[in-house]
Image: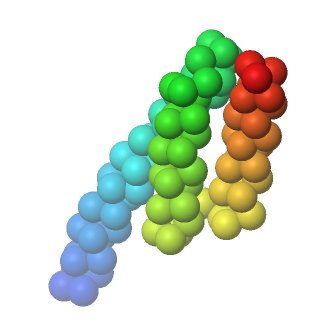
Amino acid sequence: MPNIKSAIKRVKTNEKRRALNASQKSALRSAVKSATTALESNDVEAAQTAVKTASQKLDKAVTKGLIHKNAAARKKSRLAKKANALKAEQA
């Protein structure tokens, strides 16, 4: 444990940020997974809303610095590709 006041504060803030980042990253993974399962269930309406939610969470994670912007773009692209294929299949 640090003795210097600023170092003590830094440890506290780091712990708060770590907990917040962990919860946001977990919510992000859950959103992506729910979108994937909705796509696999062949329900077009549910899949579209789930993909939209996942895309929003991915964009938010990029602005927070949780994931790299190219990683988010790649995940969004793959989800959109699957959603478009499902939509074309149903039509």
Extreme left residue here? 5
Q: Give the image quarter of residue 86.
A: top right
State the image coordinates of residue 41 (x, y, percent, origin top left): 62, 13
State the image coordinates of residue 24 (x, y, percent, origin top left): 40, 50
| Colour scheme shown | rainbow
Can the viewer see residue 66 in this picture?
A: no
Residue in view at x 54 percent, y 61 percent:
59
Extreme top residue here? 41
How many numbered circles are shown? Answer: 0
Q: Which of the image's four quarters has the C terminus? A: top right
Residue in view at x 80 percent, y 28 percent:
88
In this orientation, which residue lies closer to the viewer: 56 or 65?
A: 56
Residue in view at x 76 percent, y 36 percent:
84
Q: Which of the image's four quarters has the N terminus? A: bottom left
State the image coordinates of residue 87 (x, y, percent, origin top left): 72, 29
Q: Give the image quarter of residue 33.
A: top right
Can the viewer see residue 23 in this picture?
A: yes
- 35 left or right, relative to 10: right
- 31 left or right, relative to 91: left
- 17 left or right, relative to 85: left
Q: Looking at the picture, does residue 16 appear above or below residue 9?
A: above
